Amino acid sequence: MSSAAEALSGPPPAAASSAVDLDLLRQVLLAEPSPASFVLEDGVGDEELMPAAVLFPIVQRMGEPTVLLTQRTAHLKDHPGQISFPGGRCESADSSPAHTALRETAEEIGLSPANVEIVGYLPEYRTSTGFRVTPVVAMVTPPFDLCLDAFEVAEAFEVPLSFLMDPANHQQHSLHYRGKLRHYYAMPYGDYFIWGATAGIIMSLYRALEIASR
């Protein structure tokens, strides 16, 4: 993985196969979190960014792996109603980004760490809303029971990994935010509009797999 920053507003890479090789996926991940490898969301300036971490949970369903996502409740101050990975801000008691991701996931949706195998990391994702997010990629073994935090999480749902890795499902949009035109990726799935940092992190995995499969 290149240590250079990657511009979010650039064009999507060439098409890749819709079949997802989980062995290759493991190989393209970073073995450890590294601030030297990062993706800049469109609109990031030179402000100090707050550390955070999310879990990128790949559920090993029979026949086809899926990605477990959440929809935030509509009343939240930050990103209400948006689709997100479970995760949040790093706290002083957290020993690592993986610890943050697992703790936040257990708090938000009740997924037990016993069902989770951390397999690597994606480049740090730096957002225009002031965070530097470490995506922690994990394989999740079913069966498992979820218990959603009703204050933060309206719903948890799964999307086929092949859908998210298919460039035919990748869209580019723009909006005016804080007086500037910003570009972002989106991956509409049924009634769910996956966009922003969540789609940007998914694109990080897509790009790594596309490069490795050339």
Image (cartoon, rainbow, N blue to C red):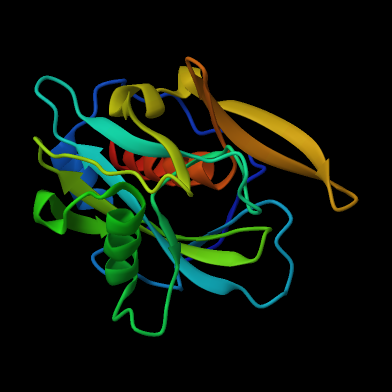
**Residue at image coords 53%, 67%:** 132
Q: Position of residue 86 (x, y in %)?
A: 38, 50
What number of labels is visible?
0
In this view, the residue in front, 93 or 63, is 93
Could you tell me which quadrant the C terminus lies in? top left
* Image-based side of 76 in relation to 116, left or right: right
Is residue 85 something one can see in this rendering?
yes
**Residue at image coords 13%, 54%:** 117
In this view, the residue in front, 7 or 44, is 44
Q: Position of residue 90 (x, y in %)?
A: 43, 73
- Looking at the image, the residue that sits furthest to the right is 179
The answer to which quarter of the image holds residue 164 is top left
Q: Position of residue 13 (x, y in %)?
A: 50, 33
- Looking at the image, the residue that sits furthest to the bottom is 92
The answer to which quarter of the image holds residue 15 is top left
Q: Position of residue 119 (x, y in %)?
A: 18, 55
36 is higher (above) or lower (below) than 40 = below
In this view, the residue in front, 57 or 22, is 57
* Image-based side of 209 in relation to 142, left or right: right
**Residue at image coords 31%, 20%:** 18
Is residue 210 something one can see in this rendering?
no
- Looking at the image, the residue that sits furthest to the front is 150
169 is higher (above) or lower (below) than 91 = above
In this view, the residue in front, 132 or 145, is 145
Could you tell me which quadrant the N terminus lies in? bottom left
**Residue at image coords 17%, 39%:** 145
